[in-house]
Image (cartoon, grey):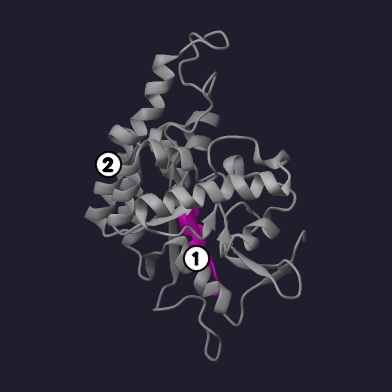
Amino acid sequence: SKAGQAPFWPDGIRLPISLSVMFESGSQPRFNPPTPFNNFVPPEGIYDMPTISWYRYGVTEGIPRALDLFDRLGIKMTSHMSGQSVQMYPKTALEIVQRGHEAAAHGWDWSTESTMNDEQELAFIQKNVDVIQKVTGQRAVGYNAPGLRGSKNILQNLHTLGFKYHIDDVSRDEPFIVDIDAKRQIAVVPYAVYLNDIRAYEARSFADADFLDNLKRSFDRLYKESGNRRRMFAVTMHDRLLRPEHVETMEEFLRYALKKSGVSFMKKIDIANYITSAPNAIREPIGA
Protein backbone atom coordinates (compact mmCIF):
# COMPACT_ATOMS: atom_id res chain seq x y z
CA SER A 1 0.00 0.00 0.00
CA LYS A 2 1.07 3.60 -0.51
CA ALA A 3 2.89 5.53 2.21
CA GLY A 4 0.57 6.71 4.95
CA GLN A 5 -2.29 4.58 3.66
CA ALA A 6 -3.90 1.87 5.77
CA PRO A 7 -2.92 -1.57 4.46
CA PHE A 8 -5.40 -3.34 2.25
CA TRP A 9 -4.71 -6.71 3.94
CA PRO A 10 -2.85 -7.93 7.03
CA ASP A 11 0.50 -9.73 7.27
CA GLY A 12 1.94 -8.45 4.00
CA ILE A 13 -0.76 -10.10 1.90
CA ARG A 14 -1.24 -8.47 -1.49
CA LEU A 15 -4.00 -10.68 -2.92
CA PRO A 16 -5.84 -13.28 -0.85
CA ILE A 17 -7.46 -16.24 -2.55
CA SER A 18 -10.75 -17.33 -1.04
CA LEU A 19 -11.38 -20.94 -1.97
CA SER A 20 -14.74 -22.62 -1.35
CA VAL A 21 -15.82 -26.24 -1.53
CA MET A 22 -19.57 -26.75 -1.54
CA PHE A 23 -20.54 -29.88 0.42
CA GLU A 24 -23.98 -30.75 -1.00
CA SER A 25 -23.99 -34.51 -1.60
CA GLY A 26 -27.34 -35.94 -0.53
CA SER A 27 -29.09 -32.56 -0.23
CA GLN A 28 -30.28 -32.44 -3.84
CA PRO A 29 -34.01 -32.80 -4.61
CA ARG A 30 -35.18 -36.37 -4.14
CA PHE A 31 -36.88 -36.52 -7.54
CA ASN A 32 -35.56 -35.09 -10.80
CA PRO A 33 -32.47 -33.28 -9.50
CA PRO A 34 -30.10 -31.74 -12.07
CA THR A 35 -28.30 -34.59 -13.80
CA PRO A 36 -25.47 -35.06 -16.31
CA PHE A 37 -27.31 -38.10 -17.69
CA ASN A 38 -29.48 -36.26 -20.17
CA ASN A 39 -29.76 -39.22 -22.51
CA PHE A 40 -32.62 -40.41 -20.32
CA VAL A 41 -34.64 -38.28 -17.94
CA PRO A 42 -36.75 -40.59 -15.76
CA PRO A 43 -40.41 -39.80 -15.16
CA GLU A 44 -41.32 -38.02 -11.93
CA GLY A 45 -41.02 -40.32 -8.93
CA ILE A 46 -38.67 -42.87 -10.52
CA TYR A 47 -35.61 -43.82 -8.47
CA ASP A 48 -32.67 -42.53 -10.54
CA MET A 49 -29.63 -44.55 -9.49
CA PRO A 50 -26.99 -42.96 -11.77
CA THR A 51 -27.92 -39.43 -10.72
CA ILE A 52 -28.08 -40.32 -7.03
CA SER A 53 -24.69 -42.01 -7.27
CA TRP A 54 -23.28 -39.02 -9.16
CA TYR A 55 -24.06 -36.79 -6.16
CA ARG A 56 -22.55 -39.38 -3.80
CA TYR A 57 -19.29 -39.16 -5.78
CA GLY A 58 -18.61 -35.91 -3.95
CA VAL A 59 -18.26 -37.80 -0.68
CA THR A 60 -16.58 -40.99 -1.89
CA GLU A 61 -14.04 -39.40 -4.23
CA GLY A 62 -14.34 -35.63 -4.67
CA ILE A 63 -13.83 -34.18 -1.21
CA PRO A 64 -11.07 -36.65 -0.20
CA ARG A 65 -9.21 -35.80 -3.42
CA ALA A 66 -9.51 -32.06 -2.80
CA LEU A 67 -8.51 -32.30 0.87
CA ASP A 68 -5.35 -34.16 -0.09
CA LEU A 69 -4.54 -31.45 -2.65
CA PHE A 70 -5.04 -28.68 -0.09
CA ASP A 71 -2.78 -30.48 2.38
CA ARG A 72 -0.03 -30.84 -0.24
CA LEU A 73 -0.17 -27.14 -1.04
CA GLY A 74 -0.70 -25.90 2.53
CA ILE A 75 -4.04 -24.30 1.64
CA LYS A 76 -6.98 -23.62 3.96
CA MET A 77 -10.48 -23.06 2.57
CA THR A 78 -14.11 -22.58 3.54
CA SER A 79 -16.64 -25.36 3.03
CA HIS A 80 -20.29 -24.36 2.78
CA MET A 81 -22.14 -27.39 4.10
CA SER A 82 -25.77 -28.26 3.47
CA GLY A 83 -27.33 -29.53 6.69
CA GLN A 84 -28.75 -32.70 5.23
CA SER A 85 -25.32 -33.57 3.76
CA VAL A 86 -23.70 -33.18 7.18
CA GLN A 87 -26.40 -35.38 8.72
CA MET A 88 -25.94 -38.07 6.04
CA TYR A 89 -22.14 -37.96 5.94
CA PRO A 90 -20.92 -36.77 9.35
CA LYS A 91 -17.44 -38.29 8.97
CA THR A 92 -16.83 -36.15 5.88
CA ALA A 93 -17.95 -32.96 7.62
CA LEU A 94 -15.79 -33.71 10.65
CA GLU A 95 -12.73 -34.49 8.53
CA ILE A 96 -13.02 -31.17 6.68
CA VAL A 97 -12.87 -29.31 10.00
CA GLN A 98 -10.21 -31.58 11.53
CA ARG A 99 -7.95 -30.81 8.57
CA GLY A 100 -8.10 -27.12 9.39
CA HIS A 101 -10.84 -25.78 7.15
CA GLU A 102 -13.81 -23.57 8.00
CA ALA A 103 -17.32 -25.01 8.21
CA ALA A 104 -19.86 -22.50 6.90
CA ALA A 105 -23.62 -22.88 6.41
CA HIS A 106 -25.48 -23.56 3.15
CA GLY A 107 -29.10 -24.11 4.23
CA TRP A 108 -30.65 -27.42 5.16
CA ASP A 109 -31.11 -28.74 1.62
CA TRP A 110 -31.97 -27.33 -1.82
CA SER A 111 -35.37 -26.01 -0.81
CA THR A 112 -36.41 -22.67 -2.28
CA GLU A 113 -35.39 -20.29 0.47
CA SER A 114 -36.26 -17.12 -1.45
CA THR A 115 -40.02 -17.57 -0.90
CA MET A 116 -39.81 -18.44 2.81
CA ASN A 117 -41.23 -16.17 5.50
CA ASP A 118 -38.98 -15.13 8.39
CA GLU A 119 -40.04 -17.98 10.66
CA GLN A 120 -39.41 -20.59 7.96
CA GLU A 121 -36.07 -19.12 6.93
CA LEU A 122 -34.79 -18.79 10.49
CA ALA A 123 -35.66 -22.44 11.16
CA PHE A 124 -34.14 -23.60 7.83
CA ILE A 125 -30.82 -21.93 8.66
CA GLN A 126 -30.76 -22.73 12.38
CA LYS A 127 -31.24 -26.43 11.67
CA ASN A 128 -28.19 -26.22 9.38
CA VAL A 129 -26.10 -24.44 12.03
CA ASP A 130 -27.11 -26.93 14.72
CA VAL A 131 -26.13 -30.07 12.80
CA ILE A 132 -22.76 -28.58 11.77
CA GLN A 133 -22.01 -27.70 15.38
CA LYS A 134 -23.14 -31.10 16.66
CA VAL A 135 -21.04 -33.01 14.13
CA THR A 136 -17.92 -30.83 13.82
CA GLY A 137 -17.87 -28.78 17.01
CA GLN A 138 -17.64 -25.62 14.90
CA ARG A 139 -20.27 -22.87 14.96
CA ALA A 140 -20.88 -21.68 11.39
CA VAL A 141 -20.88 -17.87 11.10
CA GLY A 142 -20.82 -17.57 7.29
CA TYR A 143 -23.75 -18.22 4.97
CA ASN A 144 -24.46 -19.15 1.37
CA ALA A 145 -28.13 -19.62 0.50
CA PRO A 146 -29.04 -22.42 -1.94
CA GLY A 147 -28.64 -20.91 -5.39
CA LEU A 148 -27.47 -17.69 -3.64
CA ARG A 149 -31.09 -16.68 -3.11
CA GLY A 150 -32.34 -16.05 0.41
CA SER A 151 -35.56 -14.26 1.34
CA LYS A 152 -36.00 -10.48 1.14
CA ASN A 153 -35.12 -10.31 4.86
CA ILE A 154 -32.12 -12.64 4.66
CA LEU A 155 -29.59 -10.16 6.06
CA GLN A 156 -31.76 -9.28 9.06
CA ASN A 157 -32.38 -12.98 9.68
CA LEU A 158 -28.68 -13.86 9.42
CA HIS A 159 -27.84 -11.13 11.91
CA THR A 160 -30.50 -12.44 14.28
CA LEU A 161 -28.89 -15.89 14.09
CA GLY A 162 -25.42 -14.52 14.87
CA PHE A 163 -23.83 -14.71 11.43
CA LYS A 164 -20.82 -12.51 10.71
CA TYR A 165 -20.86 -12.67 6.91
CA HIS A 166 -22.58 -13.99 3.80
CA ILE A 167 -21.35 -14.56 0.23
CA ASP A 168 -24.50 -14.14 -1.87
CA ASP A 169 -23.59 -10.67 -3.16
CA VAL A 170 -21.51 -10.62 -6.34
CA SER A 171 -21.30 -6.84 -6.77
CA ARG A 172 -17.60 -6.33 -5.94
CA ASP A 173 -14.18 -7.93 -6.16
CA GLU A 174 -13.44 -7.02 -2.54
CA PRO A 175 -15.16 -7.60 0.80
CA PHE A 176 -17.31 -4.86 2.29
CA ILE A 177 -19.81 -4.09 5.04
CA VAL A 178 -23.59 -3.77 4.69
CA ASP A 179 -25.27 -1.60 7.30
CA ILE A 180 -28.61 -3.23 8.04
CA ASP A 181 -29.54 -0.26 10.22
CA ALA A 182 -27.76 2.13 12.62
CA LYS A 183 -26.78 -0.67 14.98
CA ARG A 184 -26.57 -3.81 12.87
CA GLN A 185 -24.12 -4.81 10.15
CA ILE A 186 -22.96 -7.88 8.26
CA ALA A 187 -19.84 -8.44 6.18
CA VAL A 188 -19.95 -9.51 2.54
CA VAL A 189 -17.24 -11.84 1.24
CA PRO A 190 -18.21 -11.81 -2.44
CA TYR A 191 -18.79 -14.81 -4.65
CA ALA A 192 -17.38 -14.89 -8.19
CA VAL A 193 -20.11 -16.35 -10.38
CA TYR A 194 -17.88 -17.16 -13.35
CA LEU A 195 -15.08 -18.74 -11.32
CA ASN A 196 -17.38 -21.55 -10.30
CA ASP A 197 -16.91 -25.07 -11.61
CA ILE A 198 -20.63 -25.64 -12.18
CA ARG A 199 -20.87 -22.48 -14.28
CA ALA A 200 -17.73 -23.48 -16.19
CA TYR A 201 -18.33 -27.15 -16.82
CA GLU A 202 -22.12 -27.47 -16.80
CA ALA A 203 -23.55 -24.09 -17.79
CA ARG A 204 -20.89 -23.15 -20.35
CA SER A 205 -19.50 -26.57 -21.30
CA PHE A 206 -15.91 -25.45 -20.85
CA ALA A 207 -13.06 -27.80 -21.51
CA ASP A 208 -10.54 -27.89 -18.66
CA ALA A 209 -8.15 -25.73 -20.67
CA ASP A 210 -10.88 -23.10 -21.04
CA PHE A 211 -11.52 -22.95 -17.30
CA LEU A 212 -7.80 -22.85 -16.52
CA ASP A 213 -7.36 -19.92 -18.92
CA ASN A 214 -10.35 -18.17 -17.34
CA LEU A 215 -8.89 -18.61 -13.84
CA LYS A 216 -5.43 -17.38 -14.82
CA ARG A 217 -6.68 -14.32 -16.69
CA SER A 218 -8.97 -13.26 -13.87
CA PHE A 219 -6.22 -13.80 -11.32
CA ASP A 220 -3.66 -11.87 -13.37
CA ARG A 221 -5.94 -8.84 -13.69
CA LEU A 222 -6.85 -8.78 -10.00
CA TYR A 223 -3.19 -9.20 -9.05
CA LYS A 224 -2.33 -6.11 -11.12
CA GLU A 225 -5.16 -4.12 -9.56
CA SER A 226 -4.19 -5.24 -6.05
CA GLY A 227 -1.15 -2.98 -6.18
CA ASN A 228 -3.27 0.08 -5.50
CA ARG A 229 -6.60 -1.09 -4.09
CA ARG A 230 -8.08 -3.92 -2.02
CA ARG A 231 -8.82 -6.96 -4.17
CA MET A 232 -9.61 -10.61 -3.47
CA PHE A 233 -9.87 -13.67 -5.69
CA ALA A 234 -12.77 -16.06 -5.09
CA VAL A 235 -13.09 -19.49 -6.68
CA THR A 236 -15.77 -22.11 -5.97
CA MET A 237 -15.65 -25.89 -6.29
CA HIS A 238 -18.47 -28.40 -5.78
CA ASP A 239 -18.01 -31.82 -4.20
CA ARG A 240 -19.44 -33.87 -7.10
CA LEU A 241 -17.37 -31.96 -9.68
CA LEU A 242 -14.05 -32.74 -7.99
CA ARG A 243 -13.26 -35.25 -10.69
CA PRO A 244 -9.65 -36.23 -11.50
CA GLU A 245 -9.36 -33.94 -14.52
CA HIS A 246 -11.00 -31.01 -12.74
CA VAL A 247 -8.78 -31.29 -9.67
CA GLU A 248 -5.76 -31.62 -11.95
CA THR A 249 -6.83 -28.34 -13.55
CA MET A 250 -7.35 -26.67 -10.19
CA GLU A 251 -3.95 -27.83 -8.93
CA GLU A 252 -2.29 -26.32 -11.99
CA PHE A 253 -4.00 -23.01 -11.31
CA LEU A 254 -3.25 -23.00 -7.58
CA ARG A 255 0.45 -23.70 -8.19
CA TYR A 256 0.48 -20.88 -10.76
CA ALA A 257 -1.06 -18.43 -8.30
CA LEU A 258 1.21 -19.44 -5.42
CA LYS A 259 4.29 -18.42 -7.42
CA LYS A 260 3.27 -14.75 -7.13
CA SER A 261 4.57 -12.78 -4.16
CA GLY A 262 2.00 -11.68 -1.59
CA VAL A 263 -0.56 -14.34 -2.57
CA SER A 264 -2.11 -16.12 0.39
CA PHE A 265 -5.14 -18.31 1.02
CA MET A 266 -7.64 -16.94 3.55
CA LYS A 267 -10.71 -18.63 4.99
CA LYS A 268 -13.80 -16.48 4.55
CA ILE A 269 -14.19 -15.96 8.29
CA ASP A 270 -10.71 -14.42 8.40
CA ILE A 271 -11.58 -12.11 5.51
CA ALA A 272 -14.85 -11.14 7.23
CA ASN A 273 -13.15 -10.49 10.56
CA TYR A 274 -10.51 -8.32 8.91
CA ILE A 275 -12.91 -6.20 6.88
CA THR A 276 -15.24 -5.75 9.86
CA SER A 277 -12.50 -3.94 11.76
CA ALA A 278 -10.68 -2.30 8.83
CA PRO A 279 -10.87 1.51 9.10
CA ASN A 280 -11.04 1.95 5.31
CA ALA A 281 -13.67 -0.72 4.54
CA ILE A 282 -16.38 0.10 2.03
CA ARG A 283 -19.76 0.44 3.75
CA GLU A 284 -23.11 0.34 1.97
CA PRO A 285 -26.69 0.71 3.18
CA ILE A 286 -28.87 -2.36 2.85
CA GLY A 287 -30.47 -2.65 -0.56
CA ALA A 288 -27.89 -0.40 -2.24
Residue 222 spot, x, y in % from top left: 51, 61
For the residue pair 193 and 276, the one nearer the viewer reads as 276
**Which of the labelled discs sits on residue 64, or is there none?**
2
Residue 74 spot, x, y in % from top left: 26, 60
Magenta range is 218-235
For the residue pair 32 and 167, the one nearer the viewer reads as 32
- Labels 2 and 1: the sequence-earlier one: 2
Q: Are marks 2 and 1 in contact (CB under 8 Å)?
A: no
Is residue 229 inside the magenta stretch?
yes
The residue pinned by badge 1 equals: 224
Is disc 2 placed on a helix, strand or loop? helix
Q: Residue furthest bottom?
A: 4
Residue pictured at 26% horizontal, 56% vertical: 73
**Which of the labelled discs sits on residue 237, or is there none?**
none
Is residue 204 in view from this perspective? Answer: no
- Describe residue 251's horizontal placement relative to residue 168 as left or right: left
Instruction: State which mark lies toward you, 2 or 1.
Output: 2
Q: Residues within 10 Å of mark 2 (few under 14, many from 20)?
A: some
